[in-house]
Amino acid sequence: MRQKNHLIWGVGLVLLWLVGCGGGISKQIRSQVTYSGSFKALQKAPQEQIGTTVIFGGKIIAIEPKDDRTELLVLQLPLDASDRPEDNGQSDGRFILSSRQFVDPALYPKGSLITAVGQLEASEERLIGQMPYRYPVIAPLEIKKWPPRTDSGPRFHIGIGVGKTF
């Protein structure tokens, strides 16, 4: 009986580990990435990388369906080991995902964290306010929308007196 319980716990832990590791960009699409430089380097000379397959992530700033495509304007964020964007206040710029398929703004609302693998098609100059800005334009092969993180860490605070916490 004891051995059976250990086996059940072991199988359960393996399943939890597999579920926790899954859910990112598929291995098949991830294996197609050919660009290994930084986003900052790509932005300095995007014309040299046209046609390469890249992986970048970030936060959706805006999404605009058009007649023949949907454009997602994305604030680039660094990716963690599982390719999830880290919303830590650091960014090297912005990029445009230009999908030939309809991407519903209700499913990918402003503020959503995404990771995308796609082919660098072009760079396009647009304005941010009144400042000209050069955007890398990426045709996505796969887009992963990440669920919001749940803060499951311990909540710790010290209280002294009534209504005072530190």
Image: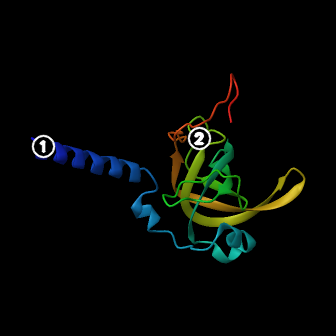
Instruction: Note whether residue 64 is visible.
Output: yes
Q: In the rendered image, which residue does mark 2 sit on?
A: 108
* Relative to 87, 25 lies left or right: left
* Tag of residue 90: none
Of residue 1 and residue 7, the one placed in the foreground of this image is 1
Residue at image point 72% right, 65% down: 123
Give the colouring mode of the picture. rainbow
Badge 1: residue crowd in 10 Å (few <14, some 14–19, many ≥20)? few
* Tag of residue 2: 1
Of residue 110 and residue 64, the one placed in the foreground of this image is 110
Report x, y in % for residue 149.
Answer: 54, 42
Q: Secondary structure at mark 2?
A: loop
Kind of residue indicated by mark 1: Arg
Number of dots carrying numbers: 2
Kind of residue indicated by mark 2: Tyr
Report x, y in % for residue 162.
Answer: 68, 22
Report x, y in % for residue 72.
Answer: 65, 49
Residue at image point 22% right, 48% down: 11
- What is the C-alpha distance between the residues marked 2 and 1? 48 Å
